[in-house]
């Protein structure tokens, strides 16, 4: 059908066209309040069409099967008002071989999925029977096909298997939320890593503790880094933000802005990560791209249009949104790591705070790297030990400044979700405000 | 497929299964979006989403199948039923409702589908130009969308309902920058079944642009505990985020501890506090006639005279808790099952004028507009888009945006003044369980909170 769409678009007056098909078949097994509740089957697909007509970009998407006419009509209707196209759809390219498909995901039985999910809940509740848990185990198969009028064509399949458990403990008006999740392109038969994380959270939150207001050393767990620091950090590497001068990194390529121990790269060629792929959603071949190398700003992320606007090389980071629109996003982000475990970082810090989940992230000058929020799950460190969970505690800082001036240590990393490899990170000082 | 053929097809597919309940939903949405980031238009596009789902219940277990291809509907029903039978081990709970058969006509004001794309672009180009012509502005962003949606719902109990709606939403933001300092101001607006608000925003756009620039010169608030007056937008969002989500019965019904905490009759506020949710309140973003389980929309008191008197239900949560369904089961689109959601959530007006609310505040903060924030049921953190000091009963200098944090329960009890000027915020979209943005509205008059933690953002 994609060829048909392109042909019709060209016949109706487009000079170039690109059609993108995506399909997902997902089977989530959902547990609610400690027991199996719902079984789903999601089979959804859609086609996105982009045209270049008289130098301008038009776009459309449709999930109605066989909607060739509709797609072409909608895309051509929008093109006269669209932005000037600053690129041509890429010709045929050779793509790296990237492992994203595991047949064992497709054949994973429902009984085994139920067993796995119930196992997560039971293991967590053995430690804390009062916990009320939701859990999910999902298997999915994605298929992606892209075709354009320059002769470009790509197609790949990706399996995704994920599992997670989240628990709530309510005592009066006091609420504790714990949880962890894991995802991969390969089947996961063992939930012990997820269970281990949740049990650690429960143990560390067993007692409550108070920290005093002031500056102090703070350790972000991998989840804490992913939830609180990653957004403000990665936004600055978006080619669009850089091109518009909104990123604090604009014009700083090649400069050593961070601690030399800090490196960060995006690698869609890693085997079996959920962001892995042979090419991006515009057909630009995947490659490992350093963003920060030993503290030096190395690259920014671009899609075709932004690369054209900025006069930069496309980096293969065009990604489709739910309506088919193209934006810029990383695929698999990997942080350089250290050798110490989370517990060792805590010992090294001596006295301070651990941040696991921050509430209210995304406020303030995110474009500038600011983050701040209420500590939803975090702990006090005293004498090198975690002594209890803190509440009514607010932290605030700037991720660029922290990574430049206050990096104490990077710990041993772990995968958070399916496509993000992050270490726990200890910072020498961060501003902390506690009530009472 | 004609509407009659579709109906026949659905009703045929629903017959003859061994399940406690089955429903089919089919929806089609046609949307236009126009996005500006910076001086240039970044994206303009049209989209059509079409698909359906089947949900089946058997002995307390649910099966749910979603799809784009409407052929072989009976096969989809079979799959959902067998899923439900795989899960179901206990008993089904589903509150009784009268099955409704209705074709609800679309009552539309100015129809965005009748406005040519060229006109929409011209108008938004003009707004973007207004922002850029304001001295000191360094960037702008505009996000416009309109979406027409038609939903058909049918159940094994004999319900058959067709509804339509048009959602129009517009967010306009300006950024000002000086050295390393960045300040933003924005406005989010929306309407149900009416485009006309989009056409008359020039003054509002100028105000937003000027505000971003003014904030560069505004002082920081001195962090501390203050009496705080919230404007209707911020108070409405507070009401939705901090209290509304706690009222959703699906958080509560399977959790003994939360049931104790949210027991009806418990005092949550002073006797002046009344909080309502209801899709039956007409003409707002969260309004509809029937929810996605075919339950007629209602107006539900959550808090009356400070006391918890109700909560929001799906048919299942209502039956499990022995309460009446409230018509709050909603699904974002065919890809999702309906879950308990808010509709139009608001604090009812009281008697105070704005002057009354600030009159006896020696030193306090007047916080307006919504910038961002979240709650964890127990705690909340919100950013105001705009804030002023209040000194000796008067609104004083403009502040840099402030952040309000606190404990939800303490803060509700601390609401000690309620204005008479109810207004609704229709620019929001609510997110829950991956279903976002669901059209909702929230509203409030100006309210006063006796003491609240205020910090820099």
Image: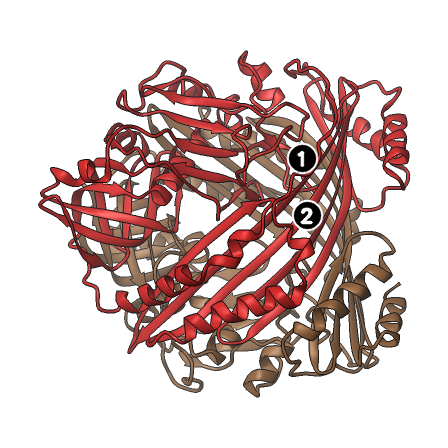
Chain colours: A brown, B red
Q: Is residue B378 left or right of residue B76?
A: left
Instruction: Check the image and name the residue furthest to the top.
Output: B322
User: What label does residue A87 carry, if any?
Assistant: none
Asked if A21 appears above or below A373 in the picture, the reply is below
In the rendered structure, are the residues bearing label 1 and label 2 in contact, judged by CB atoms less than 8 Å apart?
Answer: no
x%, y% of residue B404?
Answer: 28, 46
Q: From mark 1 to mark 2, how far is it between C-alphas?
A: 20 Å
Is A241 displayed left or right of B269 in the figure?
A: right
Give the structural element (helix, strand or loop) at label 1: loop
Q: Is residue A210 visible?
A: no
Q: What residue sits 56% from the left and 26% below the top?
A: A34
Task: Please state the chain letter of the residue tagged with numbered disc 1 in the rendered image.
Answer: B
Whether residue B143 can be seen here: yes
Residue B446 x/y as whole percent: 29, 39
Give the residue drawn at x 57%, y 65%.
B35
Task: Return the x and y of residue B176 as percentages of the image width and height.
Answer: 34, 71
- Quadrant of residue B132 in the image? bottom left
Q: How many marks?
A: 2
Q: Nearer the viewer, residue B78 or B417?
A: B417
**Can you identify the residue that label 2 sits on?**
B148
**Quarter occupied by the N terminus of chain A:** bottom right
Q: Residues within 10 Å of mark 2 (few under 14, many from 20)?
A: some
Q: Is residue A299 above or below residue A35?
A: below
Could you say whether the residue bearing mark 2 is in a helix, strand or loop? strand
The image quadrant of residue B233 is top left
Q: Which residue is mark 1?
A: B337
Q: Residue at x 69, y 15 (%)?
A: B98
The chain carrying label 2 is B
Give the residue at x 73% y 75%: A96
- The quadrant of the rendering that contains the C terminus of chain A is top left
Q: Does residue A241 lie above or below A139 as drawn?
A: below
């Amino acid at each position: 059908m994609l060829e048909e769409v392109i042909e019709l678009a060209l016949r109706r007056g487009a000079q170039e066209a690109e059609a993108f098909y995506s399909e997902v078949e997902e089977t989530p097994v959902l547990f609610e309040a400690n027991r199996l509740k719902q079984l789903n089957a999601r089979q959804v697909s859609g086609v996105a069409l982009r045209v270049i007509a008289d130098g301008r970009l038009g776009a459309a998407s449709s999930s109605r099967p066989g909607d060739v006419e509709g797609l072409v009509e909608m895309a051509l209707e929008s093109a006269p008002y669209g932005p000037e196209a600053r690129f041509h759809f890429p010709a045929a390219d050779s793509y790296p071989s990237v492992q994203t498909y595991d047949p064992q995901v497709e054949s994973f039985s429902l009984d085994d999925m139920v067993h796995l999910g119930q196992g997560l809940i039971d293991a967590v509740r053995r430690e804390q029977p009062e916990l009320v848990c939701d859990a999910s185990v999902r298997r999915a198969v994605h298929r992606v096909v892209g075709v354009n009028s320059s002769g470009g064509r790509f197609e790949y399949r990706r399996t995704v298997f994920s599992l997670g458990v989240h628990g709530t403990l309510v005592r009066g008006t006091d609420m504790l939320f714990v949880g962890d999740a894991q995802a991969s392109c390969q089947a996961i038969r063992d939930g012990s890593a997820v269970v281990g994380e949740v049990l650690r959270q429960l143990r560390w939150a067993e007692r409550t503790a108070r920290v005093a207001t002031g500056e102090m050393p703070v350790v972000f767990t991998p989840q804490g880094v992913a939830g609180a620091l990653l957004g403000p950090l990665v936004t600055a590497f978006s080619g669009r933000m850089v091109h518009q001068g909104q990123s604090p990194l604009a014009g700083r390529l090649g400069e050593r802005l961070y601690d030399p121990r800090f490196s960060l790269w995006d690698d869609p060629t890693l085997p079996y990560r959920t962001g892995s792929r042979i090419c991006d959603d515009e057909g630009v071949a995947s490659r490992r791209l350093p963003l920060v190398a030993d503290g030096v700003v190395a690259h920014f992320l671009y899609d075709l249009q932004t690369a054209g606007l900025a006069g930069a090389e496309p980096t293969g980071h065009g990604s489709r949104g739910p309506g088919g629109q193209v934006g810029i996003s990383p695929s698999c982000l990997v942080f350089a790591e250290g050798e110490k475990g989370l517990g060792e970082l805590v010992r090294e810090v001596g006295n301070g705070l651990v941040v696991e989940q921050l509430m209210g992230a995304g406020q303030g000058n995110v474009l500038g790297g600011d983050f701040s929020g209420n500590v939803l799950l975090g702990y006090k460190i005293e004498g090198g030990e975690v002594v209890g969970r803190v509440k009514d505690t607010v932290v605030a800082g700037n991720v660029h400044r922290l990574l430049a001036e206050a990096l104490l240590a990077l710990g041993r990393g772990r995968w958070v979700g399916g496509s993000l490899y992050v270490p726990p990170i200890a910072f020498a000082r961060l501003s902390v405000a506690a009530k009472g | 497929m004609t509407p009659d053929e579709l109906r026949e097809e659905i009703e045929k597919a629903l017959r003859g299964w061994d399940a406690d309940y089955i429903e089919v939903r089919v929806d089609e949405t046609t949307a236009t979006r126009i996005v500006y980031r910076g001086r240039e238009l970044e994206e303009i596009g049209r989209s059509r989403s079409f698909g359906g789902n089947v949900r089946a219940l058997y002995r307390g277990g649910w099966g749910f199948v979603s799809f784009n291809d409407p052929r072989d509907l009976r096969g989809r029903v079979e799959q959902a039923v067998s899923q439900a039978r795989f899960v179901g081990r206990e008993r089904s709970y589903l509150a009784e409702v009268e099955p409704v058969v209705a074709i609800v006509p679309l009552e539309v004001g100015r129809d965005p589908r009748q406005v040519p794309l060229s006109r929409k672009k011209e108008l938004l180009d003009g707004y973007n130009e207004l922002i850029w012509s304001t001295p000191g502005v360094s960037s702008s962003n505009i996000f416009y969308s309109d979406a027409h949606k038609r939903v058909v719902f049918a159940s094994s109990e004999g319900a058959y309902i067709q509804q339509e709606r048009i959602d129009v939403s517009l967010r306009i933001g300006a950024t000002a920058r000086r050295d390393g300092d960045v300040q933003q101001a924005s406005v989010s607006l929306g309407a149900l079944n009416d485009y006309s608000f989009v056409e008359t925003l020039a003054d509002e756009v100028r105000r937003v642009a000027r505000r971003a620039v003014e904030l560069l010169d505004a002082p920081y608030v001195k962090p501390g505990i203050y009496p705080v007056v919230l404007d209707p937008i911020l108070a409405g969002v507070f009401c939705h985020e901090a209290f509304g989500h706690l009222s959703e019965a699906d958080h509560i019904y399977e959790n003994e501890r939360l049931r104790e905490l949210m027991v009806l009759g418990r005092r949550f506020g002073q006797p002046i506090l009344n909080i309502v949710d209801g899709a039956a309140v007409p003409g707002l973003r969260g309004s509809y006639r029937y929810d996605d389980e075919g339950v007629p929309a209602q107006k539900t008191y959550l808090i009356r005279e400070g006391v918890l008197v109700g909560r929001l239900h799906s048919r299942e949560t209502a039956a499990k808790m022995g309460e009446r369904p409230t018509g709050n089961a909603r699904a974002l689109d065919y890809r999702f099952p309906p879950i308990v959601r808010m509709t139009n959530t608001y604090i009812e007006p009281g008697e105070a004028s704005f002057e009354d609310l600030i009159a006896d505040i020696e030193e306090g903060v007047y916080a307006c507009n919504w910038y961002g924030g979240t709650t964890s049921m127990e705690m909340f953190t919100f950013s105001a888009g705009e804030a002023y000091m209040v000194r000796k009963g008067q609104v004083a200098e403009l502040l840099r945006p402030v952040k309000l944090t606190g404990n939800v329960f303490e803060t509700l009890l601390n609401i000690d003044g309620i204005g008479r000027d109810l207004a609704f915020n229709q620019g929001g979209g609510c997110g829950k369980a991956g279903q976002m943005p669901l059209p909702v509205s929230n509203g409030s008059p100006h309210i006063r909170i006796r003491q609240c933690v205020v910090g820099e953002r």
